Image (spheres, rainbow, N blue to C red):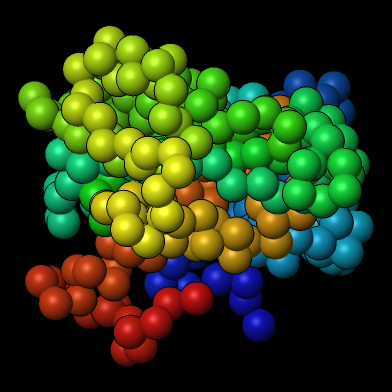
Amino acid sequence: MPALPSSLFEPVWVQFAALWPEQPEFDPSHPLGCHRRRIPDRVVFEHVIAALVHGSGYERVASDACSDRTIRRRLRLWADAGLGEQVHELALDAYDRMIGLDLTDVSADGAITKAPCGGDRAGRSPVDRGKGGMKRSTGVDGYGIPLGMTGAGANRHDSPLLRDTFEACSTQLRHRWPEQVTAHLDRGYDNNRCRDLLDELGFDAQIARKGIPAPIQIGKRWVVERTNSWMNSFGKIRRCTDRDATIVDFYLYLAAAIVTIRQLIQRARTLYRWDTRPTTRRLK
């Protein structure tokens, strides 16, 4: 059973392959021209998607067609080239052209997940008895489409990550912000530092006040909580065992690209018709 349905996998793979052209089957620099055959990128990409969805180690997702060492080497090349961020940027552009991003209302929030192996994005988790954890700060549009994110240790507070989060959103959007933007944040951002940052960015602030129960002032920031739930459905995000920050960011943006494409297909069902339109309304 595939890790992703073909209606989700194929759009991601087509854009990924366009960014990373297929390499020769044999290494042209080999003096005898008889080096062992290169594993096709699509085969390796299928194993990477399996690792992302299931959260399994590379030894477990490896097969006769692709070893765990090949997965690690190819993953390093793709992460260093920034392909995760580029695929997510293309997904955002497609969503904006077909559905339209709601950038007048944006939200941001952090989510803590497990990082048992430590690494550049790990820290002592305050909600898991001091075990290794990672905090993911995500910025979303008014519907909950992930615009950008940044990772840090689980012991970091949400508010210092707000600047990096909105800078990541600006990078992915190529600074296409409308004239009036309202940022909806929870009471963890109720401080002068965050308000000064929003004034610097030119955003209006709708921040929940400390001391007031959340259901009374939930506002329009609930969509980021839903997006965090979408992201946590990926096993590699929910329990990250990679230590290198570049690899972690690659997985984060690849998962965000899949989430964006899934919402694009679901919302386009009532607006467009195409031959390969999924027959089910729910895409896992």
The mark total stands at: 0
Q: Give left or right: position of 128 versus 152.
A: right
- Dividing the picture into quarters, in which one does residue 50 lie? bottom right
**In the current view of this chain or complex, which residue is farthest to the bottom?**
279
Q: Could you say which quadrant of the image residue 283 lies in?
A: bottom left
Measuring from the top left, give residue 43's x and y in whole percent.
Answer: 67, 58
| Residue positioned 55% across, 32% down in the render | 158
Q: Is residue 197 above or below residue 159?
A: above
Q: Residue at the location (29% across, 78% down)?
A: 276
Percent coordinates x, y for residue 238 in the rendering: 69, 56
Identify which residue is drawn at 79% across, 41% down: 125
Q: Nearer the viewer, residue 236 or 207?
A: 207
Residue at position x 38%, y 26% in the image: 166
Vertical side of 184 occupied by 227: above or below: below
In the picture, measured across the screen, residue 52 lies left or right of residue 195, that is right
- In the rendered image, is residue 168 in sight? no
Q: Is residue 42 visible?
A: yes
Left or right: 97 as drawn, with respect to 216: left
Q: Nearer the viewer, residue 273 or 283?
A: 283
Name the spot of residue 148 as percent of width and height, x first.
42, 35
Of 74 and 176, which appears nearest the observer? Answer: 176
Measured as percent of width and height from the top left, residue 105 is found at 21, 42
Q: Quadrant of the N terminus?
A: bottom right
